[in-house]
Amino acid sequence: MAQDMTLAELAAALGLSHQQLQKYETGTNRVSAGMVLKIAEALNLTLDELFAASRVAPRTTSPALAKCVRLLGQFDDTELSRAYSVLCALKT
């Protein structure tokens, strides 16, 4: 995370609870455009930098991961939440 900020520190800087920030991170709750701007400002990043940091770099990832990311990009929030639950179940 930018400037070695923890999630708890970012949540405090945004005036959010750690739990609310976690919900944004996991896709449980949607993030408003205004909140995206606040997050970028708190991390001292431009919006371009913030979104570039979240993209998967095709040259540095496996082809299988790139295919998964492309597929996930087509999902709505409900589908993403279900996919996340399935992936977590596979990991354990």
Image (cartoon, grey):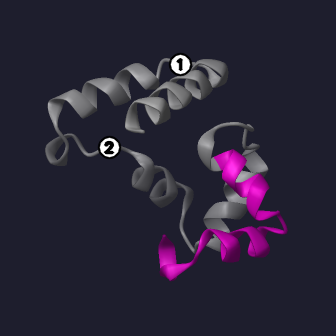
Q: CA distance from mark 2 to mark 1?
A: 16 Å
The amino acid beneath tag 2 is Val
Q: Position of residue 67 (x, y in %)?
A: 27, 24
Q: Is residue 68 magenta?
A: no
- Please tell me how crowded label 2 is: few (under 14), some (14-19), or many (20+) other residues with Cα within 10 Å: few
- Which badge, 2 or 1, is on the more N-terminal residue? 2
Q: Position of residue 3 (x, y in %)?
A: 50, 81
Q: Position of residue 77 (x, y in %)?
A: 64, 25
Q: Residue shown at 71%/46% (left/top)? A: 23
Residue carrying label 2: 56
Q: Is residue 81 left or right of residue 89?
A: right
Residue carrying label 1: 75
- Tag shown at residue 34: none
Label 1 residue SS: loop
In the displayed structure, 33 sits above or below 45; it is above
Of residues 36 and 91, the one drawn nearer to the viewer in this rendering: 91
Q: Which residues are magenta?
A: 1-24
The amino acid beneath tag 1 is Phe
Q: Residue shown at 48%/31% (left/top)? A: 89
Of residues 66 and 44, the one drawn nearer to the viewer in this rendering: 66
Q: Quadrant of residue 81?
A: top right
Residues tagged 2 and 1 counted as in contact (Cβ below 8 A): no
Label 2 residue SS: loop
- Image quadrant holding the C terminus, namely top left
In the displayed structure, 90 sits above or below 24; it is above
